[in-house]
Amino acid sequence: MGLRDEEARAYTTRGGDFEVDETVYRRGFEAALMPFVRGRGYDVVLVELRQVYPEICQTGAFRCGFDRGHEWDAARRSPEDRAA
C-alpha cells in the first residue's frame, strides 16, 4: 500500500470524502513539509499559510492533510532534527 492509499483510508475514516477533497487535502499535507513550516504546528503557522493558501488553508480537508503531513514528517525525522 502506498502513501496515497494510506492517506485516503485515514481521511475516509475521519468522515471525509477523499475523492472529492484529495486536491485540498494534498495541499495541506504538502504544506506541512514546506521548509518554513516543517516541524511547526498548524496554529503556529496559520498566518503564513493564509498568505500561501488563502482560499483553502482553513478548510477541514486542508487541516486534516496538514496534520497528517506533520505526523508523517515527524515520524521520519531523527530526534536531533525534531529538536532543531
Image: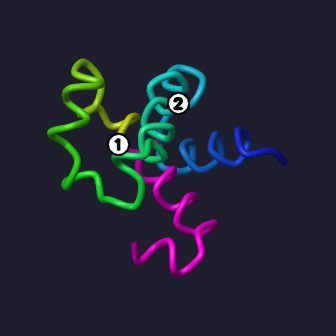
Q: Nearer the viewer, residue 34 or 46?
A: 34
State left or right for residue 50 relative to residue 82: left
State left or right for residue 54 relative to residue 75: left
Q: Mainly helix, strand or loop, the magenta region? A: helix
What amino acid does circle 1 point to?
Arg
Q: Nearer the viewer, residue 80 or 73?
A: 80
State left or right for residue 15 relative to residue 52: right
The residue at the far bottom in this view is 79
Mark nearest the camera among 1 and 2 is 1
Q: Nearer the viewer, residue 79 or 23?
A: 79
Question: Image point 52% across, 30% down: which residue?
Answer: 17
- Which residues fall within the magenta stretch? 63-84
Q: Nearer the viewer, residue 31 or 82?
A: 82
The residue at which mark 1 appears reads as 63
Question: Whole-percent x and y of residue 79?
Answer: 53, 81
What amino acid does circle 2 point to?
Asp
Question: Image point 28% across, 25% down: which residue?
Answer: 52
Residue 66, quarter of the rendered image: top left
Q: How many numbered discs, if any?
A: 2
Question: Whole-percent x and y of residue 2?
Answer: 80, 45
Question: Whole-percent x and y of residue 58?
Answer: 23, 34
Eyeballing the image, is 84 above or below 63? below
Question: Whole-percent x and y of residue 16?
Answer: 48, 37
Q: Please, which colouring scheme is shown?
A: rainbow
Residue 66 covered by magenta stretch: yes
Assess disc 2: are there few (<14), some (14-19) or many (≥20) residues with their C-alpha within 10 Å of its C-alpha.
some
Labelled disc at residue 17: 2
